[in-house]
C-alpha cells in the first residue's frame, strides 16, 4: 500500500510540477489533490472540445451567412425589378386610359360634328329648294324646262364643301353658322336681327345643350379616370406599407443589439485604457511643465534683451523711413515742378494750336497761289502782256518762303508734340514710381507694425506667466519656511528619542534573546500550519474556479446550441421565403407577359379606334 502511495505521489508530483504547481504536497492530501487534478484534466479536455465545437459552429455560421448573402442580393434585385415593372405598368395603364379618354372625347366631338353638319346640310338643301321654287314661280318657262330642272334637282345633289377661307361663310348663310372644327367640337347657330339700330345675336339652345352634354361626359370620364388613379395609388401605398411593416425577426434584432452592446463594451474598455494612458501622459506633462517654468524664466530674460534690441532697431528703422519719406516727398515735388503745372500744359497746347493755324494759313496762301497760276486761267491771261522775269522770280521766291515757313512750323509742331509726349511719359513714370514707393513704404510699415504687435503680445504673455509664477511662488515659499521650522522641531525630538531608544535597545536585546528561542519553535509549527492552510486554500480556489468554469462552459454550450437552432430556423425560414419569392416572381412574370399581351390588344384596339376615327373624319369631310 505504501509503494502504491509512493508511486501515486511521485506521478502526481511530476504532473503538478509540469503544470507549474510547486507547493509542498502532504501525504494526506494526495487523494483530494488527485481527484481535483483528474477533474481539472477532464474539464480542460471538455473545454478544449467545447472551444473546438464553438469554432466549428462559428465557421459554419459564417459559411451560412456567406451563403445567404447572394440570395439576399438576388432578393433585393428582384424586388427592385418587380417594383420597377409595377410602376412601369401603372404608368402605361394611365397613359392608355388617358389616350382612351381622349379618343372617346374626339369620337363624341366628331359625332356631334357629323350631326350638326347633317342638320346644316338639310338646312342648306331646304334653302336651295326654296330658292328653286321661287325661281320656278318667278319665271314663266316651259314645261320642258320645268321638268328638266326637277330632273336635275332629283339626279344631282347640291355640292356642299366644308372648306372655308378663314372664318368667312357664304353670302347665303352670313355669320349664322360656324363649324365645330374652329370652336372645340361645338356647332353654334346664331341669328342676327336689328332693332332700332341695335344688333342682337341669339344662340340656338340645341347647340348649347350639345356642348354642355359633351362637357359633362368628358368631365365624368375624367372623374372616373382620376378615381381609378387614386384607387391604384392607394393600393400601391398599402402594398408598400405592408412591405415596410414586415421588418426583421426579433431574434435577428436581439442578435444585432447584442453585437452592438459587445462592441460598445469593447469601446468602453478601450476608452478606459486610453484614459489611464492619458493620466500617465498628464503626469509626465506636469513634470515637463515644471521644466518649462524654468525655461520661461530664461525666456523672460531673453525677451527683455530682445525688447531692448528691438526698440533700438525700431528707432533706427523709423529714422530711416522718415528720411526716405522726406527724400521721396522732395523728389515728388521736384518731379511735379519739372513736369509743369496745368497752365504750362495749356500754354503748350495753345502754342501748338497757333502753329497749326499758321500752317493752315500758309497752306491756304500756297493753294491760292497755285490756283492763281493754274492752266484753267491761261485763257484769261492771254490778252495780258507777258510777265517779266522779275515778277516770275518774285512769285517763285514767295512760294519757296511759304514752303520753308510751312516746313518750319511743322517741325516746331512736331517738336512740341514730342516734347509734350515726353513730359507725359515722364509724369506717368514718376507717378508709377511714387505709387510703388508709397506701396512699399505702406507694406513695410504694416510688416513692422505686425511684428511689433506680435512682440508686444509675446511680452504680455511672458509678463502674465511671470506674474502667475510669482503668485504661485509666494505660498510655496511660506510652505517651505513652515516646513523648515517643523524639520527643526522634529530634529530636536529625534535626538531625544534616539537617546531613549539607546536605553531601550539594551533592554530589548536581553528580551529578544529569550523571545528568539520561543519564536523559532513557534515559527516551525506556524510554517507547517501555513503551508497546509495555503495548500488547502489553493485547492479550494481551484475547485471553485473549476466549478465556475464548468458552469460557464455549460452555459456557453447551451447558448451556442440555442444560437445554432435559431440559425437553422432562420435558414429554413429564408429557404421558405426564397421559395415564396421565386413563386411570386414567376407569378409576376406570367402576369407581366399577360399584361404585355393585353397591352398589345389595347394598342390594336386603339389603332382600330384611330382608324375608325379617321374614317369618320373622312366621311364627315
Image (spheres, grey):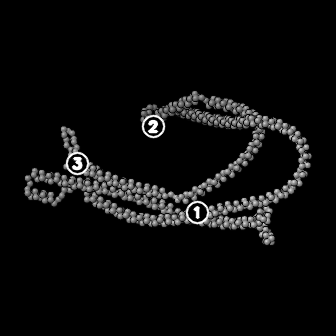
Residue 301 appears anywhere in the view: no
Instruction: Determine the CA span between mark 1 and mark 2.
Output: 131 Å
Q: Secondary structure at mark 1?
A: helix
Residue bearing mark 1:
563
Whether residue 367 sits left or right of residue 30 in the image: it is: left
Q: Secondary structure at mark 3?
A: helix
Disc with the residue nearer the chain's start (2 vs 3)? 3
In this orientation, which residue lies closer to the viewer: 550 or 473? Answer: 550
- The quarter of the picture where residue 465 lies is top right
Q: Residue at x 32, y 62 (%)?
A: 608
The percent position of residue 490, horizontal first and vertical second, equals: 84, 39
In this orientation, which residue lies closer to the viewer: 321 or 275? Answer: 275
Position of the N terminus, as image quadrant, is bottom right
Disc with the residue nearer the chain's start (3 vs 1)? 3
Instruction: Determine the CA span between mark 3 and mark 1.
Output: 84 Å
In the figure, 98 relative to 329: above or below?
below
- The quarter of the picture where residue 84 lies is bottom left
Residue bearing mark 3:
205
In this orientation, which residue lies closer to the viewer: 19 or 518? Answer: 518
Disc with the residue nearer the chain's start (1 vs 2)? 2
The percent position of residue 433, horizontal first and vertical second, equals: 64, 36
Position of the C terminus, as image quadrant, is bottom left
- The quarter of the picture where residue 105 lies is bottom left
Q: Residue furthest top?
A: 343
Q: Secondary structure at mark 2?
A: helix
Q: Are marks 3 and 1 in contact (CB under 8 Å)?
A: no
Crowding at mark 1 (Cα within 10 Å: few <14, some 14-19, many 20+): some
Residue bearing mark 2:
375
Amino acid at each position: 500500500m505504501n509503494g502504491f502511495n509512493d508511486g501515486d505521489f511521485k506521478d502526481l508530483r511530476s504532473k503538478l510540477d509540469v503544470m507549474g504547481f510547486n507547493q509542498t504536497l502532504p501525504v494526506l492530501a494526495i487523494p483530494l489533490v488527485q481527484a481535483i487534478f483528474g477533474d481539472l484534466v477532464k474539464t480542460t479536455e471538455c473545454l478544449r472540445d467545447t472551444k473546438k465545437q464553438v469554432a466549428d459552429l462559428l465557421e459554419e455560421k459564417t459559411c451560412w451567412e456567406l451563403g445567404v448573402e447572394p440570395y439576399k442580393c438576388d432578393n433585393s434585385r428582384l424586388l427592385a425589378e418587380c417594383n420597377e415593372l409595377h410602376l412601369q405598368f401603372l404608368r402605361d395603364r394611365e397613359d392608355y386610359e388617358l389616350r382612351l379618354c381622349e379618343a372617346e372625347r374626339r369620337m363624341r366631338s366628331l359625332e356631334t360634328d357629323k350631326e350638326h353638319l347633317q342638320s346644316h346640310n338639310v338646312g342648306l338643301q331646304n334653302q336651295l329648294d326654296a330658292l328653286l321654287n321661287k325661281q320656278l314661280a318667278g319665271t314663266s318657262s316651259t314645261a320642258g324646262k320645268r321638268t328638266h330642272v326637277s330632273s336635275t334637282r332629283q339626279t344631282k345633289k347640291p355640292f356642299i364643301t366644308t372648306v372655308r377661307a378663314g372664318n368667312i361663310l357664304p353670302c347665303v348663310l352670313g355669320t349664322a353658322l360656324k363649324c365645330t372644327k374652329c370652336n372645340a367640337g361645338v356647332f353654334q347657330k346664331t341669328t342676327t336681327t336689328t332693332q332700332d339700330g341695335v344688333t342682337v345675336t341669339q344662340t340656338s339652345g340645341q347647340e348649347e345643350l350639345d356642348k354642355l352634354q359633351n362637357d359633362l361626359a368628358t368631365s365624368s370620364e375624367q372623374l372616373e379616370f382620376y378615381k381609378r388613379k387614386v384607387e391604384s395609388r392607394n393600393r400601391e401605398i398599402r402594398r408598400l406599407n405592408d412591405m415596410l411593416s414586415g421588418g426583421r425577426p426579433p431574434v435577428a434584432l436581439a442578435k444585432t443589439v447584442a453585437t452592438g452592446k459587445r462592441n460598445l463594451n469593447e469601446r468602453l474598455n478601450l476608452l478606459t485604457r486610453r484614459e489611464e494612458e492619458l493620466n500617465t501622459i498628464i503626469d509626465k506633462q506636469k513634470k515637463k511643465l515644471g521644466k518649462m517654468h524654468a525655461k520661461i524664466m530664461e525666456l523672460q530674460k531673453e525677451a527683455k534683451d530682445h525688447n531692448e534690441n528691438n526698440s533700438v532697431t525700431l528707432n533706427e528703422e523709423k529714422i530711416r523711413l522718415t528720411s526716405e519719406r522726406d527724400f521721396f516727398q522732395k523728389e515728388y515735388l521736384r518731379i511735379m515742378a519739372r513736369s509743369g503745372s496745368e497752365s504750362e500744359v495749356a500754354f503748350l497746347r495753345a502754342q501748338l494750336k497757333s502753329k497749326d493755324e499758321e500752317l493752315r494759313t500758309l497752306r491756304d496762301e500756297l493753294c491760292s497761289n497755285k490756283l492763281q497760276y493754274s492752266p484753267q486761267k491761261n485763257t484769261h491771261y492771254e490778252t495780258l502782256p507777258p510777265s517779266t522775269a522779275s515778277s516770275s522770280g518774285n512769285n517763285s521766291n514767295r512760294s519757296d518762303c511759304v514752303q520753308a515757313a510751312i516746313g518750319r512750323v511743322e517741325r516746331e509742331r512736331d517738336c512740341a508734340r514730342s516734347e509734350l509726349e515726353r513730359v507725359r511719359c515722364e509724369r506717368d513714370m514718376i507717378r508709377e514710381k511714387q505709387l510703388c514707393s508709397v506701396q512699399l513704404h505702406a507694406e513695410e510699415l504694416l510688416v513692422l507694425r505686425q511684428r511689433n504687435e506680435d512682440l508686444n503680445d509675446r511680452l504680455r504673455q511672458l509678463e502674465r506667466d511671470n506674474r502667475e509664477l510669482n503668485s504661485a511662488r509666494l505660498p510655496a515659499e511660506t510652505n517651505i519656511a513652515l516646513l523648515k521650522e517643523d524639520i527643526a522641531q522634529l530634529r530636536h525630538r529625534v535626538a531625544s528619542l534616539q537617546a531613549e531608544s539607546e536605553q531601550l535597545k539594551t533592554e530589548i536585546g536581553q528580551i529578544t534573546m529569550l523571545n528568539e528561542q520561543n519564536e523559532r519553535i513557534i515559527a516551525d509549527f506556524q510554517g507547517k500550519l501555513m503551508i497546509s492552510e495555503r495548500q488547502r486554500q489553493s485547492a479550494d480556489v481551484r475547485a471553485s474556479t473549476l466549478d465556475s468554469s464548468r458552469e460557464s462552459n455549460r452555459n456557453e454550450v447551451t447558448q451556442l446550441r440555442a444560437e445554432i437552432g435559431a440559425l437553422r430556423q432562420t435558414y429554413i425560414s429564408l429557404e421558405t421565403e426564397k421559395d415564396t419569392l421565386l413563386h411570386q416572381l414567376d407569378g409576376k412574370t406570367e402576369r407581366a407577359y399577360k399584361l404585355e399581351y393585353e397591352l398589345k390588344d389595347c394598342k390594336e384596339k386603339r389603332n382600330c379606334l384611330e382608324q375608325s376615327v379617321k374614317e369618320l373624319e373622312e366621311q364627315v369631310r
